[in-house]
Amino acid sequence: MTARSTMKGSDIVRKKQKIDLTIVIPIILFFIISIASIYSAMTYLSPDNGNLALKQAIWYLVGVIIIVIIFKLKNDYLYRNAWFLYILGNILLVCLLLFAPEINNSKCWFVIPYIGSFQPSEFMKIFIMLVLAVMISNFRDTTNHPSIKEEFIFILKTLIVVLIPSILTFLEPDTGSVMIYFIIYFCMMFTSGIRLRWFVILGIIIAVMLSLVLGCYFLNENLFVSIFGTDLYYRFDRILDWQNGSGLQLENALAAIGSAGVFGHGFNKTPIYFPESGTDFIFAVFASNFGLLGAIILIAIIIFFDTRLINMATKKIASRDKFVLAGIIGMLVFQQVQNIGMTVGLLPITGITLPFISYGGSSLLSYLILVGIILNIGNEKEREYNV
């Protein structure tokens, strides 16, 4: 029997289950780079933090197990339970605000004895993707030529889905995750097929709101504090540190990278201390150790991985998978550009980590869950297409 068969006028393409090495090999390289960079970052970290490189390796191992489980369950299982996961994620965010301990003036983590911290907002990104993929797919299936009114109602529904966890996450406060929620939303909605005029209108609204907020900040700081509070005021101050090129993190990161030359100072030879070296500024650690050549190699691997995902999204795949891929690509590209950009002083410091490289159990597991979803998209055992 050939690979193609006919059933009721449709051709069915059957694919054997296999592992896509163009996805797996970059992940293996990310693992090596992550462990090496975190080990080097430990030079200036307190011994109380433990062996972060070993912890990261363990999280990678746990993530591989999760990938295998997702690969066996298939993405349809996740889509069927998307709303349950979304509701569970919001419940966890509420519990954070009520019961979680305050760490660094934020309530972003549950502390689990003998295991570590758990950050629900990292997994909320995935839940938002799954729910939006289901909502967009159902909308497209039920309305062939939607009216402006139908699109408007649909946009309101999807916006509410994103706003609820965004408000809860902002209150922690975790501005970086809120930014990623909306990046995911815009990327998925852009591929949904709705009229482009909605994006123009939304862009105008955002521009006007930002202008009012920034105008208030620069013209009347007391009024700004009375309306938005001191927390948001200090977040704006952090952006000003970037504009002025000041701040301990940025200054020391630039010094570490600038002194590395072409080949770097060598493995485990980070020349200078800067805060959050194992998380937000992991790229600076890697670049200082391995120089310009190492940085180019890492960026090349990142570009190859992202390009592979983009190529996968252009293939004929299920609509829900296409929307999820749009969210994944948008999230990863934004985080990669933002993290590397803030490390070299081109973008404001937002606390956004570098995917697959920065230390963090919750964030790493969330990315590896996405890897399981990606492998399923391209490598299901049996998939049907109308051709």
Image (cartoon, rainbow, N blue to C red):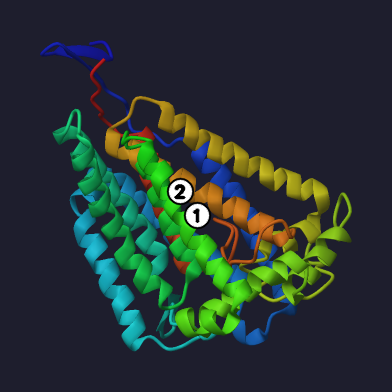
- Which disc is residue 203 wearing? 2
Q: Position of residue 2 (x, y in %)?
A: 26, 11
Pick whichever, 94 or 371, lies toward us: 94
Quarter holding residue 380: top left
Residue at x 61% of width, y 44% of height: 302
Q: Secondary structure at mark 2?
A: helix
Q: Residue furthest left?
A: 8
Left/right of residue 134 with respect to residue 322 in the rendered view: left
Can residue 219 be seen here? The reply is yes
Query: What residue is shown with label 1?
Result: 207
Which amino acid type corresponds to the residue marked 2 in the rendered image?
A: Gly
Q: Quadrant of the N terminus?
A: top left
Q: Residue at x 74, y 44 (%)?
A: 296
| Residue occupying the point 35% across, 80% down | 96
Please, what secondary structure does the residue beneath circle 1 have?
Answer: helix
Q: Are marks 1 and 2 in contact (CB under 8 Å)?
A: yes
What separation in Å lies between label 1 and label 2 (alpha carbons)? 6 Å
| Mark 1 crowdedness (10 Å alpha carbons): few <14, some 14-19, many ≥20 | few
User: In this orientation, which residue lies closer to the viewer: 82 or 338?
Assistant: 338
Q: Amino acid at mark 1?
A: Ala
Instruction: Please identify the quadrant where the C terminus is shown.
Output: top left
Q: Height in image: 273 above or below 102?
A: above
